[in-house]
Amino acid sequence: MFGILNLIIRTIEALIFLRIIISWIMPQNRGNEFVEFINGITEPILAPFRVILPLGRMGGLDLSPIVVLFLLDILKNVLFRIF
């Protein structure tokens, strides 16, 4: 059971890292199907944290991916101890 959950969490982490890298390399890349696919998967995960961490307070820097990655790591550790 942990193996499946770990795989899901690691996949989400990889997609978030990929989104971060894409946003640095191609910040204005609209209409690219691959970018839209990555954004479509990660946006529902990141959006709630943007409400908590508004961009204006951080000088325009979106910290939601960092927070989500940190929380996913904690979740992974908790699941590892349970299973």
Image (spheres, rainbow, N blue to C red):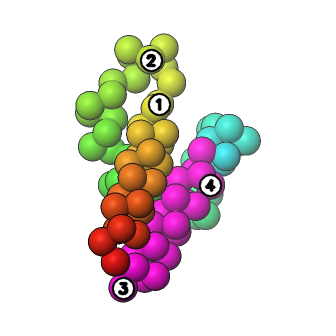
Relative to 45, is 73 on the left or the right?
Answer: right
Please give the label number shown on residue 58. 2
What segment is highlighted magenta in the picture? 1-20
The numbered mark, 4 or 1, whose residue comes first in the sequence reads: 4
Whole-number angstrom distance, CA of label 2 to CA of label 1:
7 Å
Image location (x, y in percent) of residue 35: 58, 57
Q: Amino acid at mark 3?
A: Met
In 3D space, how far apart are the residues under numbered discs 1 and 3 (Cα atoms)?
33 Å
Between 39 and 57, the one nearer to me in the picture: 57
Residue 70 place in picture, x, y as percent: 44, 45
Residue drawn at (33%, 55%), measured in percent from left and top? 44
* Res. 7 in view: yes
What residue does disc 3 label?
1
Helix, strand or loop status at disc 4: helix
Residue 6 image point, x, y percent: 46, 73
Cα separation, mark 2 vs mark 3, equals 38 Å
Check the picture and name the quadrant holding the N terminus.
bottom left
x%, y% of residue 22? 66, 48
Q: Residues within 10 Å of mark 1 (few under 14, many from 20)?
A: some
Frontmost residue, 24 versus 36 = 24
Of residues 61 and 69, which is closer to you in this image?
69
Q: Which mark is residue 18?
A: 4
